[in-house]
Image (spheres, rainbow, N blue to C red):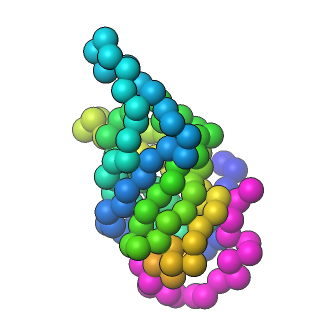
Amino acid sequence: MNEHRIGRREAVEVPALWEPTVPLRFRRGWRRRWLKQEAVQVVDLSVTGAGVVGVEQVVLKAGLTMTMDFEHGRGIVRIRRVNRRDDGATYYGVVFVDMEEELRTAINKTIGGRELVDWRWTVNR
């Protein structure tokens, strides 16, 4: 597996909001609607990425970038993996592409601040 993670992934349960960085349309019945901001759950976290569980959206695919609001911080994530679960939810494995200082601080607090890392190595380009 191609891993870019620095440090280990910590199990967490933190609510977040996310939305596509570019407008996406999806079909619901015969009408087309824009995909809006929706609530998701961050279930695991490292300084380079996260595991996010949300409602299945067929337009969300690997490679798509999303804006994620998490603990008063905001960042851009890229979806790397999409796994549909038996319970109807979907697990999205994401990597951080860009983030505000508030998000870095929130991540450090959430994963326990075990080690302060050099953040230059944590953002995937």
Give the position of the C terminus as an image quadrant: bottom right
Q: Does the magenta stretch include residue 71?
A: no
Give the residue displayed 65% in from the left and 83% down from the top.
117
Provide the residue span drawn in magenta: 109-125
Q: Nearer the viewer, residue 108 or 20?
A: 20
Residue 27 place in picture, x, y as percent: 37, 20
Residue 113 place in picture, x, y as percent: 50, 87
Magenta part, dominant SS: loop
Q: Nearer the viewer, residue 63 or 86?
A: 63
Residue 10 place in picture, x, y as percent: 45, 70
Observer able to see residue 26? yes
Q: In this view, does 1 lie above or below 16?
A: above
Q: Which residue in the rendered view is the most extreme toward the top?
A: 30
Give the residue displayed 70% in from the left and 59% down from the top.
124
Q: In this view, does 95 lie above or below 23?
A: below
Give residue 44's quadrant in the image: bottom left
Q: Is residue 108 above or below residue 47?
A: below
The tally of labels here is: 0
Give the residue displayed 36% in from the left and 26% down from the top.
33
Give the residue displayed 34% in from the left and 53% down from the top.
40
Q: Which residue in the rendered view is the most extreme toward the left?
A: 87
Q: Does the magenta stretch include residue 112?
A: yes
Q: Is residue 17 above or below residue 22?
A: below
Give residue 99's quadrant in the image: bottom right
Residue 93 place in picture, x, y as percent: 51, 50
Q: Nearer the viewer, residue 71 or 11?
A: 71
Observer able to see residue 111? no
